[in-house]
Amino acid sequence: MSQIDINARSETTALKQPKELFSYSRNIDGTWNLDEAQSKTELLSYYYFPDALLASKPNLSQGLKNFIKIPDAMNVADFPSLLKGLQNHEQIDGKRTKVDIITFRGIMTKMLTLPYNLNNGIDLYITAFDKQLFIKNNDELDEKRKARPNNDPQKAHHMQVCEFAGYKFECLTTIPKPWAQCTRQTIDKRDKKVVNNYEQYISVVKTGIGKVKTLLAGEVDCLWDYIPEDGESILPHYVELKTSRVVTSPNQAIQFEKKLFRTWAQCFLLGIKRIVYGFRDDEYALQSVEIFDTEEVPLLLKDNEIPRNENPRVVCIDALKWYGAVLDWLTKNIDLSDELVSYKFSYLPNGRYFRLSKCTDEENSSLREGGILTEEFKQWRRSIRKD
Ligand code: 0WD
Ligand code: CA
């Protein structure tokens, strides 16, 4: 077993410009669509929210009882679809994608924000294959934690409404096609549309920090304006949509700061430039909408003068130095060519270390046989192996 001190920091934070490799999507019936063009035309929507719509203070809880919600256990990061998409991409590209780590953005958001979220545990599985690390969340453990009885039904209900409110906000602020191609009906009846969280669009991006190259798959909410011409990066055109309670007290300001930091990490990792926050009151009525520039968030956090008591000021560059250190450590402490073991990489709440330990043989086999890797992907990579 080996461990990395959570106070580890890399000296530099040389960052690579993220680049989209491909995209795919999840349909309303929960099936995956690996057709990139179709995913972009059918599942990628457009931001459209004229200020005038705020006047009616739309209620973000409206339609909750018709919410088409994917069961939590099914809504986990899905490796088989990502790897199939990657295989398609490599077949078109004619070569293996040269990265060190393949994972989902949500996992890397947890890593990057760790220095300012010390009381959240993180439990990951890591498998080396074809000289690359595949990192997966331990979803079973998360499910068990979530399944603990909640003794406060009022709070449980509030959490449910808040989750719905996020998807409702997406529904109110987006249209399925560019404005000129939408019917009047589609635009005007957005508030009546049945909300679902099955449909999603996923962008797969190549990026990295220091010497470590990463491939990250992450959900993207919508486009700000249009899909650019070939040759120009689509990433700066994407938007992240979020909701939060209106900030009315210093304590809430601290909570919002934490959320904004997490959102910054989420967007930064994929190279998304714009964040749109919808602020709602305690009755879930939408009070205001504010647009943040991802690049400006670190400065906002740095200059924010709020009474923060024991809460440390969030320094994004410090989080990046930790992120650089931990990814570098992983690629150096795991033998990338050992395909006989898998690892657990875990951080206990309020711990001082992130620990790497070997999985049991059973866990290793299950990760290599469907848990992370698929037979089809392994065969594909073996078929193009040079040695
Ligand atoms: O615990 C789950 N059910 C999770 C599911 C956790 C993390 C991811 N996912 C799924 C997503 O549905 C997607 O298919 O993995 C895929 C890739 O996601 P990602 O981009 O790596 O995930 P992340 O950055 O953590 O979150 C993106 C979105 C969220 O948007 P907001 O605006 O809330 O950050 O994934 C959804 C959500 O729409 N999502 C969740 N939905 C339900 N329960 C959860 C969750 N715990 N976490 C993320
Ligand atoms: Ca969102």
Image (cartoon, rainbow, N blue to C red):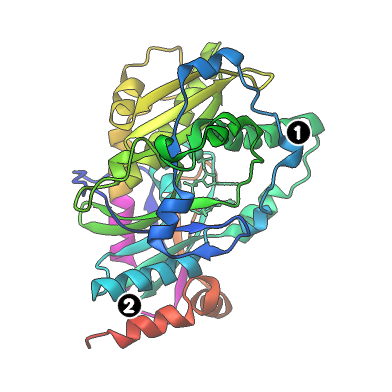
The three-letter code of the residue at mark 2 reads Asp
Three-letter amino acid code of the residue under disc 1 = His
Quick one: SS at disc 1? Answer: helix
Disc on the earlier residue, 2 or 1 = 2
> Can residue 152 be spotted in the picture?
no
Tell me which residue sits at (21%, 49%) in the image: 16
Quadrant position of the C terminus in the picture: bottom left
Residue highlighted by disc 1: 157
| Secondary structure category for the residue under label 2 | loop
Q: Is residue 322 left or right of residue 68?
A: left
Q: Is residue 227 magenta?
A: no
Separation of residues labelled 2 and 1 (CA atoms): 46 Å
Please name which of the two marks, 2 or 1, marks the residue nearer to the observer: 1
Give residue 94's position: percent from left, percent from top.
24, 76
Q: State whether residue 223 is above or below residue 245.
A: below
User: What residue would you read off at disc 2?
Assistant: 130
